[in-house]
C-alpha cells in the first residue's frame, strides 16, 4: 500500500462507524461504504472498515500467524465473521492501530506503557 493510501486510511479511521464509539458525531453508515471508497479509494476504505469493525483481541491473536494466514474477527455486533488479510493488509492494519494508539497516548486517553505498547515493541524487534 502506498504511503498516501496508508495516511488516508489513518486519517479516515476517525470517521468511526462503530456503534459504541461515535467520534464527535461524525459516524458514517455501513450502507455508504461505496461513498467512502469513492472518496479515499478501495484499499484505504478496506483498511478503515476493518479497523472499525474488528475485535482488537483478534488482531493480537493473529500476530503469531505464518505469512499468508493473518485474519481478524469482526466484533459480534458486526457479524462476528472472519476477515482474511494479505500480509500487506496485516502490516497496514498494525500501522493504523499503532497510529491510533499513539494519538490516544498524546491526548492523554491511554497510558504509554500498556499491553498495546508491549505488542508493538515485540513487533519492532
Image (spheres, grey):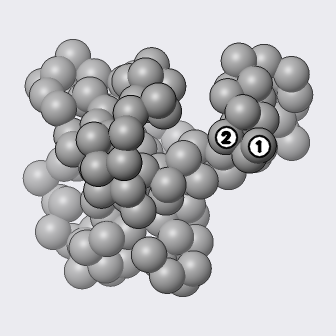
Pointer 1: residues within 10 angstroms few (<14), some, or many (20+)?
few
Residue 110 % position (x, y): 78, 25
Relative to 68, is 58 on the left or the right? Answer: right
Image marks 1 and 2: residues in contact by CB distance under 8 Å:
yes
Residue 82 % position (x, y): 17, 32
Residue 27 % position (x, y): 38, 47
Relative to 110, is 75 on the left or the right? Answer: left
Tell me what residue is drawn at x 19 percent, y 60 percent: 33
- Quarter location, residue 86: bottom left
Tell me what residue is drawn at x 37 percent, y 39 percent: 66
Considering only vertical position in the picture, is 78 above or below 70? above
Quadrant where the N terminus sits is bottom left
Considering only vertical position in the picture, is 32 above or below 66? below
- Report the residue marked by disc 1: 125
- Report the residue marked by disc 2: 123
Q: Residue furthest front?
A: 66
C-alpha span from label 1 to label 2: 6 Å
Secondary structure under the numbered disc 2 in the rendered image: helix
Tell me what residue is drawn at x 25 percent, y 29 percent: 74
Residue 75 % position (x, y): 28, 22
Using the image as rendered, state which of residue 38 and residue 73 is in the foreground.
73
Amino acid at each position: 500500500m502506498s504511503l498516501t493510501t496508508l495516511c488516508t486510511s489513518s486519517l479516515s479511521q476517525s470517521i468511526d462507524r462503530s456503534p459504541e464509539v461515535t467520534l464527535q458525531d461524525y459516524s458514517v453508515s455501513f450502507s455508504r461504504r461505496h461513498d467512502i471508497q469513492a472518496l479515499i479509494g478501495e484499499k484505504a476504505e478496506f483498511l478503515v472498515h476493518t479497523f472499525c469493525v474488528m475485535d482488537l483481541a483478534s488482531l493480537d491473536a493473529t500476530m503469531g500467524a505464518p505469512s499468508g494466514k493473518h485474519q481478524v474477527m469482526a466484533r459480534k455486533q458486526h457479524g462476528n465473521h472472519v476477515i482474511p488479510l494479505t500480509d500487506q493488509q496485516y502490516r497496514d492494519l498494525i500501522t493504523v492501530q499503532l497510529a491510533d494508539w499513539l494519538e490516544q497516548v498524546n491526548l492523554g486517553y491511554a497510558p504509554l506503557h500498556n499491553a498495546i505498547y508491549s505488542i508493538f515493541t515485540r513487533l519492532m524487534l
